[in-house]
Amino acid sequence: MSYSFAKCFDPTGARHGIPTFPWRYAPDGLATRRQLRARGLRPGGQPIAGQVLRPRYRRGPLVAYLYRLDRAKPVRPMTPAKRAALARANTARRTCPQCRRDAGYVIPTSLGVCVPCAFPDDEQRAA
């Protein structure tokens, strides 16, 4: 067992305060938020049951919190109002604030406008 593995293995929670396991060694019955979502579940307000640590060089470890599968609840269904709100938000991300056209892609926040508006000289050179 390597040193980094040993630092991340604390199933009783004596060292870290909650049960801690190395990356990919979580026991059955516990899952991360992403794993719950892949199964169509959500934590549903339950407390954190443990954590998974992945040691890294030169930085702190990556942490993923674990939740109990038996206490997870199903994901709430999408309502028509929420679906419409998401559609409007995605349309706003694609609409250029300068020329008011649908860019056909999500406008990068670094530019703030569509590419033709950000670089008008490039269009003239291409023609």
Image (cartoon, grey):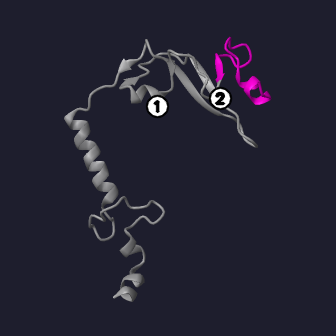
CA–CA distance between discs 2 and 1? 15 Å
Name the quarter where the N terminus is drawn: top right
The amino acid type found where label 1 is placed reads: Arg
The disc label shown at residue 113, or none: none
Sequence-first tag of 2 and 1: 1
Residue at the (70%, 20%) spot, across then down:
9
Q: Residue furthest right?
A: 3
Viewer-nearest residue: 11 or 101: 11
x and y, in percent, of residue 105 in the image: 34, 61
Which SS type dominates the magenta stretch? loop
Question: Residue 34, labelled with which disc?
Answer: 1
Pinpoint residue 39: horizontal percent, then vertical percent.
Answer: 38, 25
The kind of residue on which mark 2 rests is Leu
* Magenta stretch holds residue 3: yes
Residue 13 in magenta stretch? yes
Q: Is residue 83 above or below residue 95?
A: above
Please provide percent x and percent y for residue 14. Answer: 73, 13
For disc 1, the neighbor class at 10 Å (few under 14, some 14 to 19, many from 20) is: few
Between 105 and 90, the one nearer to me in the picture: 105
Compared to 78, does 51 lie above or below?
A: above
Mark 2: few/some/many CA within 10 Å (<14, 14-19, 20+): many
Q: Residue furthest front?
A: 1
Residue underneath mark 2: 53
In this picture, which residue range is highlighted in magenta?
1-21
Secondary structure at badge 2 equals strand
